[in-house]
Amino acid sequence: MEEKILRKLFLGFIQLHILRHGSKKPIYGVWLMDHLKDHGYSMSSGTIYPLLKKMCRDGLLSLEEKKVDGKIRKYYTTTDLGKVILKKGEEKVSELSKNI
């Protein structure tokens, strides 16, 4: 139960992290998994890709497919709505962290 609760909290922070990077440049799933691993977080493709897909459905990310080395790669960029959510999310995280 504890792991499930922590995972749910963690995924919210990961979404803010995705929005932050997607607002700077287009990102893709493998890059994101490697980036998170560099920070000590191991996330599988079975977690990352559904999360990216949901964020696109929610209007937080836009998707562009490009051919790279003969394969289609999906690049995600933070939308205007995603940038608004990112800003509000960062404010809330900052406010909450001061109170913890």
Image: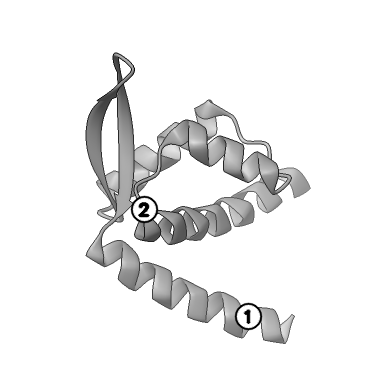
Instruction: Please state which of the two labelled residues, at mark 1 or mark 2, is closer to the viewer.
Output: 2
Residue 18 location, x and y as percent? 46, 53
* Residue 23 vs residue 52, the one in the foreground: 23
Picture layout, residue 67 above or below residue 6 = above
| Residue 16 can be seen, yes or no | yes
Residue drawn at 50 percent across, 37 percent down: 31
- Name the N-terminal-most of marks 1 and 2: 2
| Residue 1 can be seen, yes or no | no
- Report crowding for label 2: few under 14, some 14 to 19, many 20 or more residues within 10 A (C-alpha): few
In the rendered image, the quadrant that contains the C terminus is bottom right
Residue drawn at 31 percent across, 32 percent down: 74
Residue identified by numbered label 1 = 96
Residue identified by numbered label 2 = 25
* Residue 31 vs residue 4, the one in the foreground: 31
| Residue sticking out furthest to the front | 69
Residue drawn at 56 percent across, 36 percent down: 33
Picture layout, residue 76 above or below residue 44 = below
